[in-house]
Amino acid sequence: MDIVSAIASINAWVIAILISGKKHKSTADYILIAWVINFAFHFAIPFLIERQVLLHESIWGFVMGLFVVAHAPFIFVYTKSLADPEFRFDLKNFWHFGLILIYIAAFIPYLSLTPEDRMEIVMSKQDIALHTFLPMLTLLMLRVYFLIRTIVLLMKHQYSIKQSFSYEKQINLAWLTRIAYGFIALIVLSFVCYGLVSAQLITIYWMDYTLILGNMLLFFYIAFSGYKQASIQPVISGTVLNGKPTGDKPAMAEKISATAKASSKENSDPVIQELISTMERDKLFLEPELNIGDIANRMHLHAHQLSKLINSRLGKNFFEFVNEFRVEEFKKLVADPRNKHISILGLAMDAGFNSKATFNRIFKNQTGLTPSEFRESYRF
């Protein structure tokens, strides 16, 4: 295991250097670099324990716990740095790492023991002493706390982007949701392994090997996905001067305010009519990365006002609104005999979609048919 851990640690350092070499690094990239370095130290410790370098192995166990618990605030802060366009390097966002001090405090009774007593506690699996139970409980609570906060943050983010963006690829952070559940799976696995060790069904060596391997798999997925992750640009909210929209239609904001309060759901609203007309005339939905700021600027509106109007008057979010146009465009393309040689995915891309999975899901939700089933109805 020590050789495998050493190789993983070296790989982590190399990956940190590769990420550091990215051009135009965002705040999230710098946090990812620090997180990767945290993994590098995490993976190095089993090698140092096995080779009996510098510290007693019972102390190394405490040190490794620090890096393990640090993964919890790292995933939350990294997720927040991607999901929050106003994220900054400040105490407001980084105080979470101070909670690691709770874990250190929980270890004080254990560290006060002699090395021999510490090793006896570590090696004994007949019962769980207070010296080890308290740090384990603290580690568990901190990890669960940050993982729950991360999942809630991701759910809010995935809801909010549908109010402003017409696409999900690269911005919905679904891969971080998988990482969060991966860490939860590791927590469950650690309890299972500890139980098997207590029942003398496996050795401590196999428990440590299983857990370090699980962490390695998560790490490489984090590094690979994080390296590819682009920053999520905030939506431009419209051209504003002194708090009022500027341009050729200065009265449009007042129209929104009046119509948003109306109880009628009919599409006779002049702003809605103009919005739909603009979409149909200029085929804005063909732009794969269209966001509400693009349309708001064109119509001289505030993005949040336009989003609110779409929700209140049409009963849908911006994501649904734009992709309805794309589905209709796809249907027109399928119905054209000149396109019979083009693949379904090709037609979907021509209609403005930029993700096969998103296209299939949206098309099935809107039509009740798969794209293949729909195309089968047109046999030229």
Image (cartoon, helix red, strand yellow):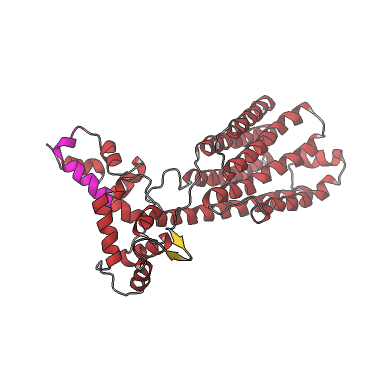
Q: Is residue 123 left or right of residue 357?
A: right
Where does residue 304 sit, x and y in percent of width and height? 42, 62
Look at the image and tell me whether residue 202 can be seen.
Answer: no
Give the mark count.
0
User: Within the magenta stretch, is there residue 157?
Assistant: no
Residue that lies at the very extreme toward the right in this rendered image: 114
Magenta-colored span: 325-341
Which residue sits at x=48%, y=54%?
Answer: 157
Q: Quadrant of the N terminus?
A: top right
Q: Nearer the viewer, residue 306 or 113?
A: 306
Q: In this orientation, which residue lies closer to the viewer: 299 or 14?
A: 299
**In magenta segment, residue 340:** yes
| In the image: residue 364, left or right of residue 293 | left
Q: In x, y percent, where is residue 217?
A: 56, 34
Residue 187 horizontal side relative to residue 302, left or right:
right
Image quarter of residue 348: top left
